Amino acid sequence: MSTDPTWRDTLLQGHWFKHLPRFLQDSLLDLSRQRELVSGQFLFQRGDPPCGLYAVLDGAMRVGAVSHEGKEALLTLVEAPQWFGEISLFDGQPRTHDAQAEGATRLLWVPQAQLLALLDQYPCHWRDVALLMSQKLRRLFVALEQQSLLAAAPRVAHRLLQIAAGYGEVDDTRRLLQLSQEQLALMLSLSRQTTNQILKSLQQEGALRLGYGEIEILDLARLQALASPAGTATR
């Protein structure tokens, strides 16, 4: 099917898609279709069957889960031009978490059956898709290490830097993050009070500006110093 040329432009801003072989880039776009979600709409929920691979074109996806007691675990906010949903592509198992639109969101969807057929025909490209998952595993191991070893303030600073850099997917560091204090607290498993105190302290130091549902980075070097207590900036 024909695709909007701006889709490619958006996706090429991300390192994973940009470094794919041109054949695989074209094949993913040819197989894809667009999906639009309204704010709060679920794309899939934990336990749903696998449905394919997705990329965010506009907006953001909230990936996490809610316990039977109503407690929420927010793993991440997936923003453009990030891809997600690849785990179920490999094992064919049900979805591990919920994916819900954070505001109006536009996605690129590559259906599971068509993508598997492509990879069966060209198995050399399984490695390319595996790289997407391995990048996320690396981030997960770093996050687990930080949760065990770092105090709350360095963890907050490091996560803000990760989000600003699109979790390593983009070249340019954003200064304005569409992120609430509550969302940041949930992602780090910190209390909202602790997160608020850390952010207010950073604002008083001139490192941040706090707004409604947003955080603006004013002093990148200050955040980097806080995120790396040993003195080496974390990127």
Image (tube, grey):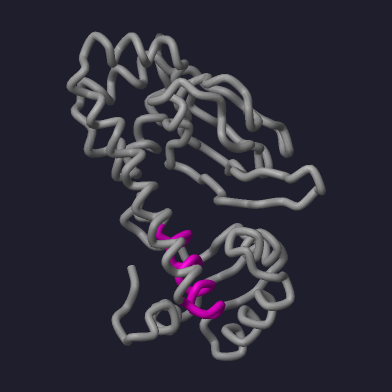
Q: Main secondary structure of the magenta part?
A: helix
Residue 43 in the figure: left or right of residue 66: left
Residue 232 in the figure: left or right of residue 39: left
Residue 22 in the figure: left or right of residue 183: left
Q: Quadrant of residue 122?
A: top left
Where residue 128 appears, x then y in whole percent?
24, 31
The answer to which of 188 and 201 lies nearer the viewer is 188
User: What residue appears at the point 46 percent right and 20 percent down from the top-left corner?
Assistant: 92
User: What residue appears at the point 43 percent right and 37 percent down from the top-left corner?
Assistant: 83
| Figure check: 41 above or below 93 | below
The answer to which of 169 and 147 lies nearer the viewer is 147
User: What residue appears at the point 42 percent right and 54 percent down from the top-left corner?
Assistant: 140
User: What residue appears at the point 65 percent right and 74 percent down from the top-left corner?
Assistant: 195
The answer to which of 183 and 134 lies nearer the viewer is 134
> Residue lying furthest right in this view?
69
Where residue 186 appears, x then y in whole percent?
65, 60
Q: Is residue 158 magenta?
A: yes
Where residue 52 appears, x then y in whole percent?
47, 21
- Magenta residues, as a range? 150-165
> Residue lying furthest bottom in this view?
205
The answer to which of 115 and 104 lies nearer the viewer is 115
| Figure check: 173 above or below 72 | below
Q: How many marks?
A: 0
Q: Quadrant of the N terminus?
A: top left
Q: Quadrant of the C terminus?
A: bottom left
| Figure check: 221 above or below 7 | below
